[in-house]
Image (tube, rainbow, N blue to C red):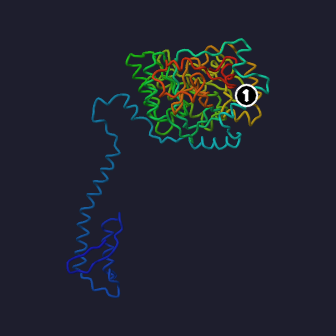
Amino acid sequence: EQVRFDKSPVITMTLEAGTEPASNAAQLFRHFSSGSGSRGKANAEPRSWATLLASLALLGTAALTAVPLLRWLQRKRRALAFEYGPLELSDMTVEAAKRMHESKEQRSSLIPDALLDLEEQGEELQAALAPSAEVDKRAQALAAVGAPPFRRFLREKGVAEPARGSCRTLQLNIGLYCNQACNHCHVESSPLRKEMMSEDVVEQCLRLLRNSPSVEVLDLTGGAPELNSGFERLVLGAAELRDSGARPNLRIIDRCNLTVLLEPGQERLAEFLAKHRVDVIASLPSYDAAQTDKQRGRKVFERSIQGLRVLNELGYGNAEKTGLRLDLVFNPPGPFLPPKQALLESKYKKELSSAHGIEFDQLITIANMPIKRYFDFLRKKGSLEGYMDLLVRNFNEETVPDLMCTNTVSVGWDGAVFDCDFNQQLELRLAPNGRGQGLNVFDLQSLDDERLRKAKIVTAAHCFGCTAAQGSG
């Protein structure tokens, strides 16, 4: 600082920030005694004691001013740390108190571990093919095991082709961003994916939902749909439609990976889902930690169990009593068909209840679809032809009339329309009369549109995955 008095030399010195006033006074005294100053020792003029006393007086005045200021700042800081109750007394509810009393521990993200998993998968899997090339490779694998294309296979078996009916399920893949990177993922989601549904597409999908009375289910998937923009708006829009009485039986589904419930910033996600009566269908490929982590990534099982506990505490898993449905999804850890669903469900319930105290409503078993990341895995292991042969051998004609493509419209993050989520990932667009570039949500005013109703369902070799044994569609 520079301190100057009338008719006195300029005193140039540095007073250490944050030190006590007495310490700064001692600095000033040493400054005068040593004869140092702005002019240097050689030209220093004698310092008068009057100047020194005036300087000390100034410091004293500064101290008298600074000390109360510092104490006020300390009191202010302490006051900001206090958790005062809300000014609006009606906000002092039991629920608000529970939220306030929750642990303040900082959450950690699963994303760094998912990126490591993705790097390891890159070393293990063959380079990904373009969707059209992937379709050709599966067709070749079918031919190698002596099986014809799916549609011709149906004709030879005397089975009617899947026929499109009224749209009962609107499935939206609202983005490919995810906090996991599962090695069986048919969407190839990961923390590196940036594709997300725009606000315009979200609003058009809600418009289609309102204009399509036949739709009974809004099915939100991803990626981790909860981490993608538009998720909250879609839930709120659908819940408003249902709760208004216009569509009282509308079901809203969140395809949840469970670990997202523990991500930083998602502390209120489970409560949001429960408040708006969103059913949860959650992936858990095993009740064994090692098997789950091998398929879905490190630390996933532990976090999945924590996520299930969060849902159970809110009433999920006992739909008959609470109305909050929680279903789990099993898919095999390798190129096998799932066990019988009813038997495996009993084992899941026993294992998860006894080991972790977890409850859920139903187990859904699905076969791994030989597309995208799992297709790459099968190619790398030399199992593609063998797995396709397994699917063909176990064809079940009873599954065909109820395949998801007969009553579902699947919409991609960009608004493109497909028969199912699997066709979506293979870019097999739904097009009127099988021609053209395919429909987009902006081409439609309702899901009862004649162009949709009359469009042929697009099939390919991967369709055997939905028709094997007990079916996956």
Examine the rendered structure and indicate whether residue 111 appears above or below residue 333: below
Amino acid type at circle 1 is Ala
Question: Can you tell which quarter of the image residue 192 is in?
Answer: top right
Q: Is residue 58 visible?
A: yes
Pinpoint residue 242: horizontal percent, then vertical percent.
Answer: 41, 19
Which residue is at the front of the view, 457 or 177?
Answer: 457
Q: Quadrant of the N terminus?
A: bottom left
Examine the rendered structure and indicate whether residue 83 appears above or below residue 150: below
161 left or right of 26 in image: right
Total number of numbered discs in the rendering: 1
Which residue is at the front of the view, 234 or 315?
Answer: 234
Pinpoint residue 381: horizontal percent, then vertical percent.
Answer: 75, 35
Pinpoint residue 118: horizontal percent, then vertical percent.
Answer: 63, 41
Question: Can you tell which quarter of the image residue 372 is in?
Answer: top right
Q: Residue at x 31, y 46 (%)?
A: 79
Which residue is at the front of the view, 446 or 346?
Answer: 446
Which residue is at the front of the view, 103 or 314?
Answer: 314
298 left or right of 198 in image: right
Residue annotated with mark 1: 139
Q: Residue furthest bottom?
A: 42
